[in-house]
Structure formats: structure tokens, C-alpha cells
Image (cartoon, coloured by chain):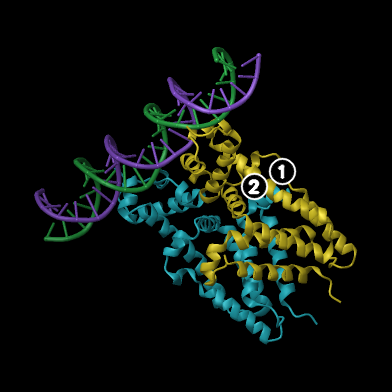
Chain colours: A yellow, B cyan, C green, D purple
DNA sequence: CAAATAAGTAACTGTTTGGTTACTTGAATT
DNA sequence: AATTCAAGTAACCAAACAGTTACTTATTTG
């Protein structure tokens, strides 16, 4: 029999579950496969997490809090204006590049019409960082740096969607454009271009 | 026994399959459910399409050609400069709004790392419209309408990704921003804003 | 150190799944 | 009207699936 270590087992299950759910989604992932990858008996998954759905919810929660941590760091830096915008885009690009599981799980959630997301507590999902970004852009307008006519909610939406789509649509876009957009240097170019695009729209020229 | 009508049966299968695959993906979709929705015997699916995989490929192909048709119409119009950009964005928004199955199937493909996409012939996927758009932006630069320093491939990428992410991430974004972004008027605002964003970057100011 | 408890195991169950087999029935061709 | 063949049907199969049961073994604690 294997050495006993509940902490290690739980972590092994969560790690394997994250990989499997990210790779195949809730319905595609197999409990047997998660057990095999975690190198534990399947019974332990049910002992620790109840059922497949609860396990998935834990993985979902964990991924959202990873994102939240990064955003909180961004908010704490308390930069503003052009520097903040550059910071946000760079941070999102880097986070999404380093967390493909997060990207996938978000996509699965959208395909499930946000079914499991709805069950999570709002505080984790309705991240306050968004409000912070919007307020910062309003401040930029007040300071005369950013154009006064822009809609700050819309531009924050554009920033987030533009960053995300570079990762979520890597395969179809690569095929469509005939270049491998999963490569690090391609991502770096996209980051650069996205920053220029957003800033050129925001900054008041004179 | 039911009235015989192979054409009608085939179409019923394809329609049901498109719905099921869009809703649940290749692995989540059930052949039995497709048969039930098409109101035919499951055996007929295997008679007409071989297996589940071939049926999926047909659905994939059909969706891509729908998109291609719309793009070809866009190319034929032969508009240029600001009008073309407005046209492209508006057309993509409308198409994606009216074809949620297309949006979903593209997402499934990305989650499958483009596995089934790879098997399709290149001519259907590497749409020539992209090259047309890039060339048109180059022309705009030559005509002195668009900024000479912009990268036309990057801006076309940005246009497409920005349009798409508004639909692919509707549920997670709605939750994140606390407003229902699936509504028609929300989409209309996004279209308007995206157009302004892209044009403000492209147009040479003076 | 023995009793209690938590950690881990193997084998099983009822259901669902993609795909098949053996068959019947409708309609066009002769 | 008999033959032929495509269109359609029902019942089935082996494998895969989420979840369970009954059990064993390691570790803690009184």
C-alpha cells in the first residue's frame, strides 16, 4: 500500500483535475483519467470532493483566484494614465500566456453558457479590478491626458477581449492567417500592437 | 413506416448535428440525440455519413463555407478605405450575431487544438478575403488615408479577434462586468465602439 | 500497546455510448 | 405485377462511464 498523505493526495487530484478539465471540459474529462493522472484510487476523489461537479467547481474557483491575485497586484501598484494601460495589457498577455488552463476553462464556461460560473459567489467573479480600471480611465480624462468623449467601460471591455482572443483563438487564427500565432515572438508582437491600438485611441493628441 | 425522402433525411441529420455539435462539442454531442432531433433512425446517420467524426467534419465544413460566402460578398463590393473597414466590422458583427453555431464550433475547434480543422482542405480555411483586407489597408496607406507606419496584418488580426471575442466570451464577460452583453443593443454598442477604435488607429490625422 | 479512526484499495453496478446486425418495407424499373 | 434495390427499423453489443460497496491497512491517541 502507498504511503499515506492526504494533503499530497488532495493536491494531486486538483492538479490532475485542472489539467483534464482544461483539456477536455467538464463533460469530456473522465474521473478515471483524473485518478490515474493523480496516481490515486478513484474512491479518494469522491471521499475528498463529493462528486465530479464539485471537483470542477473547485478547479474553476482556483483559476479565478489566480487571475484575481494578478489583478490585485496590478491595482496595488497604483499606476495611472499611459503607464497603467501598458501595465494592464502586458499583465494580461503574460498571465494568459503562462496559464493556458485558465484560458481553456473560461472557454468551456462560455460554451456551457456560464452554468458553473453562476453557482460561484459573486465576490470572486465580479472582480473589483474592473471598476478600478474604469475609474483610472475617467481620471485620465479629467487630467486631460485621455480624450473626453471616450466610453471608459467600452475601452476596458475592448482591452480585455482583445487580449483574450489572441489566446482563445490561436489555432483557428493560425490556420486562417497561415502563421503560427502560438509562438512566443508572435504573442510579443500582438502585445506590442494591442498596446499601440488602445493608446492611440485613448490619448488626446495635440 | 415513415415516408421515404433521403434528401430531407440527410438535411435533417445535418441540421440536428450542427445544433448538437455547436451546443456540446464533438465529444459531448450524442449520436442518439442527433438521431432523435432529426427524427430519423440512428442507423441512417451511419448509412449517410459513415461515423460521428465524418458527420462532424461535414458540419465544420458547412459552417466555414457560410462564413466564406459572407466574406466573398464583402470582397465583391470592392469598397475601400474607411468604408471598407466599417463594412468589415459591421459584417462580422452581424454574421456572428446571427450564427451562434459558428461561434461555438470555432471555439470547440480551438479547444481541440484545431484537430479536425487540420483535416480540412486548406482552400476552404485559408480564406483569401484576409489577403484582400490586408492589401486594401496597404492601398489606404499608399493613398495617404491610413498611417504609413501601421502593420496591416496586425490590424486585420485585431479587427477579427475583437469582433469574435464579443461573442465567444459573452457569458464570462457579462458576469465580470455585471451587465448582459448578449443583448442586441449591447452588441450594437460594441460594434460602434470597435469601429471607432480601429478607425482612430488607422486614420492619418491632420 | 490496543482501540479508534482516517487513508487507501479492488471489484462491482447500472447506465450510457458509438457502432452493428439482421430484418422489413416502399418505390422505381422491367 | 414481379423483381430489385435503396430507405428505414428495432434490437442488440462491447466498451466506457460516474459513482458505490465492502474491505484492508497505516497512523494517531488515550
Q: Which residue is drawn at 79% across and 52% down?
A: A131
Mark 1 or mark 2: which is in front?
2
- The quarter in which the N terminus of chain B is drawn is top left
**SS at mark 2 in the image:** helix
Residue C25: where, in percent of width, then height?
A: 23, 43
Most foreground residue, B84 or D16: D16
- The quarter in which the C terminus of chain B is drawn is bottom right
**Label 1 belongs to which residue?**
A124
Q: Which residue is drawn at 70% across and 61% down?
A: B190
Most foreground residue, A180 or B99: A180
Q: In this view, does B66 lie to the left or right of B13?
A: right
**Residue B83 visible, this orientation:** yes
Mark 2 and mark 1 in contact (Cβ < 8 Å)? no
Mark 1 burial class by Cα count in 10 Å: few <14, some 14-19, many 20+: few
**What's the CA distance linking mark 1 and mark 2?**
10 Å
Mark 2 burial class by Cα count in 10 Å: few <14, some 14-19, many 20+: some
Amino acid at each position: 500500500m502507498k504511503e499515506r498523505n492526504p494533503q499530497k493526495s488532495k493536491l494531486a487530484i486538483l492538479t490532475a483535475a485542472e489539467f483534464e478539465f482544461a483539456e477536455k471540459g467538464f463533460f469530456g474529462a473522465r474521473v478515471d483519467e483524473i485518478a490515474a493522472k493523480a496516481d490515486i484510487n478513484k474512491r479518494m476523489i469522491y471521499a475528498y470532493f463529493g462528486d465530479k461537479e464539485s471537483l470542477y467547481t473547485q478547479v474553476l474557483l482556483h483559476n479565478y483566484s489566480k487571475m484575481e491575485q494578478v489583478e490585485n497586484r496590478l491595482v496595488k501598484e497604483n499606476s495611472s494614465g499611459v503607464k497603467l494601460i501598458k501595465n494592464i495589457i502586458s499583465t494580461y498577455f503574460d498571465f494568459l500566456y503562462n496559464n493556458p488552463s485558465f484560458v481553456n476553462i473560461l472557454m468551456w464556461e462560455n460554451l456551457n453558457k456560464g452554468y458553473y460560473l453562476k453557482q460561484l459567489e459573486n465576490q470572486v467573479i465580479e472582480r473589483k479590478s474592473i471598476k478600478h480600471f474604469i475609474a483610472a480611465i475617467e481620471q485620465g480624462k479629467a487630467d486631460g491626458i485621455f480624450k473626453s468623449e471616450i466610453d471608459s467601460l467600452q475601452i476596458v471591455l475592448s482591452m480585455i477581449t482583445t487580449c483574450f482572443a489572441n489566446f482563445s483563438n490561436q489555432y483557428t487564427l493560425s490556420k486562417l492567417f497561415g502563421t503560427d500565432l502560438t509562438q512566443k515572438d508572435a504573442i510579443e508582437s500582438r502585445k506590442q500592437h494591442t498596446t499601440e491600438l488602445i493608446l492611440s485611441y485613448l490619448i488626446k493628441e495635440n
